[in-house]
Amino acid sequence: MTCIRSSTETCGRGQVGTERVEPERIAVELRGSLDNIRYRWERTDDWTARELGIAVHAESVRIHGFVDGNGRTTRLLADLVFLAAQDAEAIAETYDWDIDKRRYIALLRQYDVTRDPQPLAEFVPVQRLDDGENR
């Protein structure tokens, strides 16, 4: 499997730096992280729906950092969370994942350090679902 992390950082199922999520801990770590994100979403108003979906995506990648296999899954998860968190009266949007990979990976690494989804959310564009070009 290919890792998105550089060879000077922890590679494999884990985080940048000295921390590492062992394979047998992935489910527990992911559940804890997603519970923390849900708690924050329900009790604060400092994230947009767009940032919430990106936080879920980046946290999932942080815990299970392989590009083989989980990239599509974490992007789908981000889209589903983003859709569920949007105002039901608004025209729905999804992320447009056709992005510059180098910048994307750099922003994922930044998230690993800061846990701030805003820069990555600003980088990943969105598209309206009612746009005829997206059908």
Image: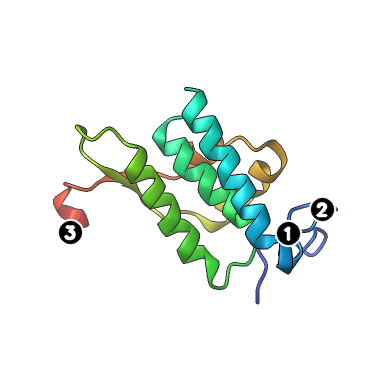
Residue 134 in the image: above or below residue 24: above
Give the quadrant of the N terminus.
bottom right
14 lies left or right of 36: right
Dot placed on the residue nearer the N-terminal end, 3 or 1? 1
Dot placed on the residue nearer the N-terminal end, 1 or 2? 1
Q: Residue at x 32, y 48 (%)?
A: 94
19 lies left or right of 36: right
115 lies left or right of 126: right
Res. 19 mark: 2
The residue identified by callout 1 is 14
* Closer-to-camera residue (125/60): 60
For disc 3, the neighbor class at 10 Å (few under 14, some 14 to 19, many from 20) is few
Measured Cα–Cα span from mark 2 to mark 3: 42 Å
Q: Amino acid at mark 2?
A: Glu
The reply to whether discs 3 and 1 touch (Cβ–Cβ < 8 Å) is no
Q: Amino acid at mark 3?
A: Arg
SS type, badge 1: loop
Dot placed on the residue nearer the N-terminal end, 2 or 3? 2
SS type, badge 3: loop
Q: Position of residue 4 (x, y in %)?
A: 65, 63
The residue identified by callout 3 is 135
Q: Amino acid at mark 1?
A: Gly
Res. 122 mark: none
Measured Cα–Cα span from mark 1 to mark 2: 7 Å
* Closer-to-camera residue (30/111): 30
For disc 2, the neighbor class at 10 Å (few under 14, some 14 to 19, many from 20) is few
SS type, badge 2: loop
Measured Cα–Cα span from mark 3 to mark 1: 36 Å
Q: Position of residue 73 (x, y in %)?
A: 47, 64
